[in-house]
Amino acid sequence: MLLRRKFLTRAFGAASVGSAGLWPHLCAAQASPGRPVKLLVGAAPGGPADFLARLTAEAMSPHLGQPLVVENKPGASGTFAADAVAKSAPDGHTLLISGPAATVNAPHVMARLTYDPARDLAPVAVLGAGAFVLAVNAGLPIRTLDELAAYARANPGMLNFGSGGIGSSGHLAGEFYSQTVGVRMTHVPYKGDGPAMNELLGGQLQVMFTAPNVAIPHAKSGRLRILAVTSRERLSGLPNVPTMIEGGVPDFEYLGWIIAFAPSATPPAVVQALQAAWSKARMAPALRQKLDDLGMLAPERLAVADAVAPFLRSEHARMSRIVKAAGIKPE
């Protein structure tokens, strides 16, 4: 346990540095200004991580002074990409763009990881963070969170909630909700959020935590209902939908996030250069509008470099509690 804590402090604390000069000012041993920076995404093109990676590449390049290119390496909940970055040269030219699945969730749900996220990866910056929505099939007689909790208590284990796989954000959000409210629902994993959403629309599933942009079109068509959002504040795109806290679930916040990681041995000056470039890029109104439209404009409290490491440590600890309380065994 003590060794693990040292790993967490070392890796998840590695990015807590201020901004510095941009890449061309670093010594040649640390960086090659003309060489592209590769952003490795552990998912197929088209998903949130891929979208944010491409926005990041376009926005950061002028401030970093060199090109950034996106490479997709899907598989095993993003762990193939995370492993590749963890074992890459620690010179800032290979970065991981990842959500929780391959970083804070994987150690708790996968028995044989080939890397240790806390030891081998250092967070650079939060590129985006946004709420999930709690959606139910429109055929259920449920329109509020109170009604959902009452229905779940009256029918223990009879409500099926779906996700894109064991250990995915949608899975652990559902477990977190069940534990917080004190109800029992049955988790049904799928190979991706798309198949799970199809089952929710078809009535085989009754409940799902998913991205707002995925649920909103189906809510407008009347095929599902959105009961709440999982952020502290309401979403601009869903002004009439309450937060979980407003709906009567105390202290419930669950964000989907995308963070850039570097190999943990990356020199601090290189990490600082990357952070400085992102800090400038994220202030562009056009980029902020795109992130807001996607529902992934990160709260300002996560925009400061010093905030990333503590946030990841708290997420790691919370996922550990959720997984243990749910009785999920690493596979």
Image (cartoon, helix red, strand yellow):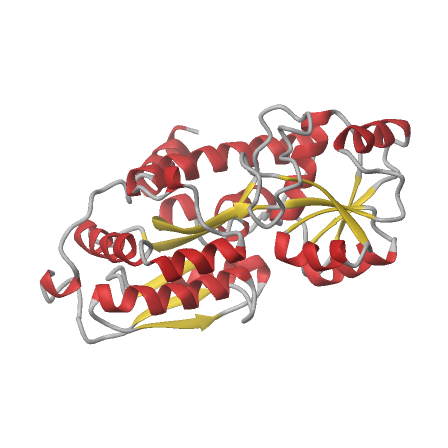
Q: Residue at x 53, y 60 (%)?
A: 48
Examine the image and state in which quarter residue 215 appears: bottom right
Residue 234 located left or right of residue 61: right
| Relative image position of residue 330 (x, y in whole percent) | 63, 44
Residue 255 located left or right of residue 264: right
Q: In this rendered view, identify the residue nearer to me: 5 or 30.
A: 30
Q: In this rendered view, identify the residue nearer to me: 37 or 202.
A: 202
Residue 88 in sight in this render: no
Q: Residue at x 62, y 33 (%)?
A: 322
Examine the image and state in which quarter residue 154 appears: top right
Q: Residue at x 43, y 72 (%)?
A: 71
Q: Residue at x 68, y 55 (%)?
A: 216
| Relative image position of residue 243 (x, y in whole percent) | 62, 35
Q: How many marks?
A: 0
| Relative image position of residue 174 (x, y in whole percent) | 69, 40
Q: In this rendered view, identify the residue nearer to me: 203 or 8.
A: 203
Examine the image and state in which quarter residue 87 appears: bottom left
Residue 218 located left or right of residue 96: right
| Relative image position of residue 159 (x, y in whole percent) | 85, 40
Image vertical order of residue 26 relative to residue 308, above or below: below
Image vertical order of residue 313 relative to residue 193, above or below: above
Residue 193 in sight in this render: yes
Q: Quadrant of the N terminus?
A: top left
